Amino acid sequence: MKLSRKLVIAVILFIVAMILPFFTNEFVISMFVQAYFWAFLALSWDVIGGYGGQFSLGHAAFVGIGAYTSTILLESYGISPWIGMWAAGVLAGLAGAFVGFTSLKLRGPFFALATIAFAELVRLFLLYFKDVTRGPLGILITQTGPQNMVFEEQFYYYYLMFALMIAGIVFLRWFENSKFGIGLVALREDEEAAEGVGINVYRTKIIGATISAFLTGIGGTFYAQWLHYVRPDVLVKLDYSTQIAAIDVVGGASSPYGGVIGSLILVPLSLYLNSIFGGMIAGLSLILYGIVLLVVVVLVPGGIYELLRKRLRKYMGGGGQSA
């Protein structure tokens, strides 16, 4: 597909997204708010999970760390989340560096199990230190207003989450062409060969894990402000970690667009099925993600984005560079 065609498609999709809230209801707007948010988390996970090839199942921990950090700063010290989200990202990034330092020498399923264990430790920490986190009761966000990232209408959250998702896409577009991003992909493909050309494999993985956690922590701040409260059992659970990874893998890992495609497909479908069968079938979202993930891995190993990209290039007669 030629660059001009890519640009036309991108502009059309952007315009549709910008005007969509004017032609739909609150439920649909809320659905897209969640889809954009999960797309950003999937893009954040992609740094270490897609480009780095390290399958993390503990990213919900970084969501929780980010959400609690900005919420405590807001409710206890009056610091706006517009500022607090950077502290949230830094603290989550430090946690990601810790996980990387202690676990990234593990391979295959052992690293995934280590990240699950870390997420459980974070959940227990949030439950135990009640003086800071208020334990299982959580923290209700009472500071309102745009200056505190709290809005009365979903309309505003729609554009806020959309901007967050676009920022994630732009970052990954830059990241995959950066020297560090290329090095991370190289070690994913062949660690021994990457080390042979001078790449410090262990350090590169740790930095990748830190960046991924930093972005996820920022996402946690936005989610907390949308929910208006934080609670350990809501934020730090295996369901969320699995959902983040599944969205990216289904959409197409190692791509700035895979997480977006996966989220725009899986999140609305999950919300719709839960609204119909949620009271009858426990864990319906996990069942859905498991089935879709299995089908995609078997039939479309590169994810939906890779399939769409090949079809578009075929039918539009493009043979140039990939999107």
Image: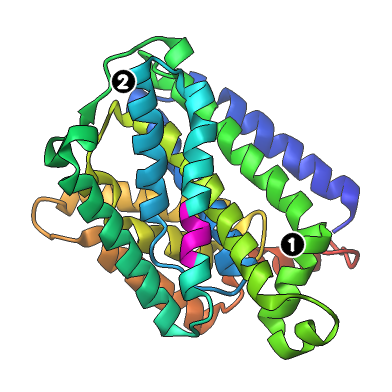
Mark 1, secondary structure of its residue:
helix
Residue 127 x %, y %? 17, 47
Q: Earlier in the sequence, mark 2 or mark 1?
A: 2
Which of pointers 2 and 1 indicates the residue nearer the eye? 2
Tag 2: amino acid: Ser
Of 22 and 294, which appears nearest the observer?
Answer: 294
- Whether residue 91 sits left or right of residue 14 in the image: it is left
Q: Quadrant of residue 47?
A: bottom right
How many C-alpha atoms fall within 10 Å of the one at disc 2: few (<14), some, or many (≥20)? few
Q: Give the residue displayed 34% in from the left and 64% down from the top.
A: 118
Q: At which x and y percent is residue 231? A: 22, 39
The image position of residue 69, as x and y in percent, is: 39, 35
Which residue position is annotated with label 2? 76
Q: Quadrant of residue 122?
A: bottom left
Question: Which amino acid type is shown beneath numbered disc 1?
Answer: Leu
Cα–Cα gap, marks 2 and 1? 52 Å
Residue 271 drawn at (x, y percent): 30, 47
How crowded pointer 1 is (Cα within 10 Å; few <14, some 14-19, many 20+) is rated as: some
Query: Residues in magenta?
Result: 95-99
Quarter of the image for the C terminus: give it. Answer: bottom right
Residue toward you, 42 or 182? 182
Numbered circle sitting on residue 169: none
Tag 1 residue: 312
Residue drawn at 82 percent across, 87 percent down: 196
Horizontal placement of 321 versus 298: left or right? right
Residue 237, can we see it? Answer: yes
